[in-house]
Amino acid sequence: MTIDVNVYDSEKLVHAICTGLVTKEELFHFQDSIWSAGQHTGYDCIFDMLKADFCKIRYSDLLEYARSAAMLDYGHPLTKLAVVVSTSQQKILTEFYQAGLKLSSPSTREIKITYSLDEAKDWIELVAS
């Protein structure tokens, strides 16, 4: 239903919290509004899918999203993307996205699938957020 975004400039972190049914349009709006303008270049990201349903997202949508993400990342510093999942479907979609990134171009995002927000924060090495 929504992707709520909190930006923590002091920690160079984008925290996206997905809830309800997420559509292709919402996913691409998130990408455009947060990453396309370039003001968050070099920021790490926590993409929290714990309370979301991605059943309307097709593999072709994810491949298109990954290609666009790879182009946006090109030439930027290495960052981390922690994807927080709660279901096997979410994990499979994230793995497909990872594969799409690798096929598109060398990505500057290191991706890790986690099963809790605390695990994601630990991996990104946040002190507090």
Image (cartoon, grey):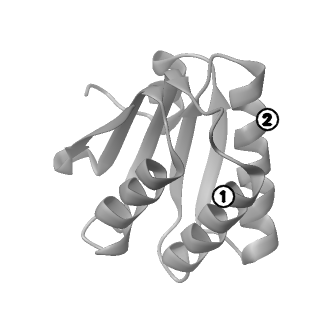
Picture coordinates of residue 31, whole percent (x, y): 42, 60
Disc 2 residue type (three-letter): Ile
In this picture, is 75 found above or below 126? below
Picture coordinates of residue 97, whole percent (x, y): 71, 52
Residue 116, numbered label: none
In the picture of the structure, the residue carrying the numbered disc 1 is 61
Disc 1 residue type (three-letter): Asp
The secondary element bearing badge 2 is classed as helix
Residue at the bottom extreme, as displayed:
75
* Horizontal relation, residue 93 to residue 75: left or right: right
Picture coordinates of residue 64, whole percent (x, y): 65, 67
Instruction: Tell me what residue is drawn at x 50 percent, y 43 percent.
Output: 23
Residue at the front extreme, as displayed:
56
**Labels 2 and 1: the sequence-earlier one:** 1
Corner quadrant of residue 61:
bottom right
In this picture, is 115 found above or below 46? above
Out of 67 and 79, give the one closest to the viewer: 67
In the picture of the structure, the residue carrying the numbered disc 2 is 92
Instruction: Tell me what residue is drawn at x 47 percent, y 20 percent.
Output: 117
Picture coordinates of residue 83, whole percent (x, y): 57, 36
In this picture, is 40 found above or below 122? below
* Horizontal relation, residue 8 to residue 108: left or right: left
| Residue at mark 2 to residue at mark 1: CA–CA distance | 14 Å
Crowd band around label 1 with a 10 angstrom C-alpha radius: few (<14), some (14–19), many (20+): some
**Nearest to viewer (mark 2 / mark 1):** 1
